[in-house]
Amino acid sequence: MFALLSFSALPVSVLGAPAPAISCVTAGDSGLTTKIIAFGGMAISGSVNAKGCDVGIYVPPGANNVVIRHATVTGANEHAILAVNVVGLLIVGDVITGNGLAINANVSDNKAVELVGTSNSIVSHNTLSNNSLDGGIALTDNGPINPGTPNPGNLSASSRNVVEFNHIYTTSPSECGIVLAAFNAGAGVKNNLIIGNLIAGNSPKNPGPGNGQIVVAANAPGATLSNNTVTANIIDGSLLPGIVVHSNAPGDIVSNTVISNNNIGNNGGYPIGGPFTSANDPINSTGIAVIAEASPHEPGPPVVTGTVILNNIISGNTFGIWTCQTSQTVVASLPINSATHSVSCPLGP
């Protein structure tokens, strides 16, 4: 049984006098404020205007089996929805728009829907648009670095989550459509499924601010991602490559990522002199990039291994697939109409 709480009629009237609007409250020990704090088993629907708050809906650690269904969440400075260390969260059929208005400089991962250290959760059939300084949806682990808040959290992996059939229209040049990102040694991001999403960004051929992209990335020393699947998504335009698998810091391991049956087109590369550009990165438009961002001569270099790239359609790019410093990468059934073919960086695979 879920406790149903609808915000579509708030603020309510008491004895003929309107009740005061609900103000922002402290979101636990996250260092952020929120409009709503969910409790375990709660069901939320209706309209949530988070104007002036960092977060629209905060699902705190231990608040399991929350359902956010057919809600409209707008006005948050940082995240429309932030969930931390929970199980069984369902976010379905929601409209997430007009968030990311004044992001916190101490938050490392700015997404409209931010799931940190969650497991067995589903984000499905939502529409995300005009979240001005935010990206779309993130699955991250938790620990000494909590990517969604200024304050650290308790160690927790991101595992067995599903992000499916969402429509994401990105408007920020610095943020991405869907991100799987690991930040904490001993936690990790594993066994997640990204399927059937539409991500619309922009590209050099269609200039505009939206970045687009699906990213699978290890971002701090000793972080790991494993056995994640990105399949049957449409990525229409991105300022950087359409799908990126990155291992960025010493001791990072990204393993056994499957990228299959995606339709990817009109993407970008890494601009020369940009903040993420190295000799390992493609500067020309690229559909899929699989990269370990370090010299192989460094001690404990980052690793990308066991990536399977199967039956993707790639168009409107200079390179179909770019690999650099990877091992055991398998590319199969690249359709004849895909952009060029699979190429490796100058440093070799």
Image: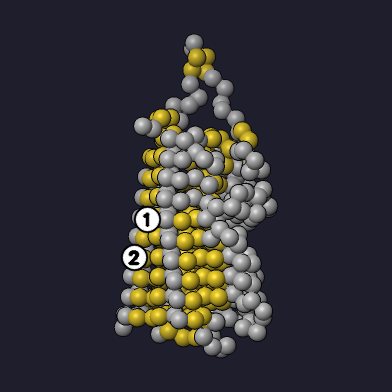
Residue 58 image point, x, y percent: 54, 40
**Type of amino acid at the residue the image marks with label 2:** Ala
Tag shown at residue 306? none
Q: Which of 274 and 107 is in front in this view?
A: 107
Query: Disc 1 to disc 2, how far (Cα)?
Result: 10 Å
Secondary structure of the residue carrying numbered label 2 = loop
Q: How crowded is mark 2: few (under 14 residues within 10 Å), some or many (20 or more)?
A: many
Q: Give the mark nearest the N terminus, 1 or 2.
A: 1
Furthest residue toward front? 186
Q: Nearer the viewer, residue 342 or 161?
A: 161
**Type of amino acid at the residue the image marks with label 1:** Glu
Please tell me whether residue 341 is drawn above or below residue 258 in the rendered image: below
User: Residue under circle 1?
Assistant: 164
Q: Residue at x 58, y 70 (%)?
A: 252
Please tell me whether residue 180 is drawn above or below residue 49 in the rendered image: below
Q: Is residue 295 left or right of residue 191?
A: right
Q: Residue at x 50, y 14 (%)?
A: 14
Looking at the rendering, which quadrant does residue 34 occupy?
top right
Residue 8 image point, x, y percent: 43, 30
Residue 71 visible within the image: no
Q: Which residue is drawn at 43% across and 44% down?
A: 89
User: Residue under circle 2?
Assistant: 232
Q: In this view, does 184 lie to the left or right of 267?
A: right
Q: Which residue is drawn at 59% across and 52% down?
A: 155
Secondary structure of the residue carrying numbered label 1 = strand
Residue 76 image point, x, y percent: 56, 42
